[in-house]
Image (tube, helix red, strand yellow):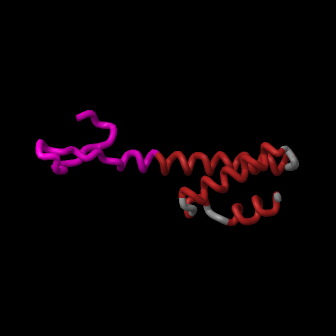
Amino acid sequence: MDEGIGSAKGQSDIGEMSFEQALTALEEIVQSLEAGDVPLDQSIALYERGEKLRAACQKRLDDAQARIERIVTDSSGQASATQPFDEQG
């Protein structure tokens, strides 16, 4: 089990992973750490990689939220403009 986590994900650059790949890798690391059957040194390495994956996922979520736009409609119900998601209109 630790072979897959160390080898496959260790070779993948986190910056090149899709959000889904990074999230799956993070979930696998969490499961391994929760199982408690990983040696201490490897647990520390997995934790460090997990933190990098978490940060990458959070950045992608933050970037996506910044791009979300809310459709503003005119009196006839037609889309007339967009505005940032978090801007009150």
Residue 60 placed where, x, y %? 49, 51
Left or right: where 48 falls relative to 73: right
Comparing 79 with 88, the one in front is: 79
Outermost residue toward the top?
A: 88
In the figure, 73 relative to 17: above or below?
above
Name which quarter of the figure residue 16 lies in. bottom right
In the rendered structure, does residue 70 fall within the stretch colored magenta? Answer: yes
Quadrant position of the C terminus in the picture? top left
Comparing 31 with 67, the one in front is: 31
In the rendered structure, does residue 29 fall within the stretch colored magenta? Answer: no
In the figure, 87 relative to 13: above or below?
above
Quadrant position of the N terminus in the picture? bottom right
Left or right: where 55 falls relative to 1: left
The span picked out in magenta is: 62-89
Residue visible at 31% across and 47% down? Answer: 69
Residue visible at 60% across and 56% down? Answer: 22
Outermost residue toward the left?
A: 75
Left or right: where 69 falls relative to 10: left
Residue visible at 72% across and 51% down? Answer: 29
Residue 12 placed where, x, y %? 65, 64
Comparing 55 with 70, the one in front is: 70
Residue 55 placed where, x, y %? 57, 46
Q: Could you tell me how many numbered marks the image carries?
A: 0
Residue 63 placed where, x, y %? 43, 49
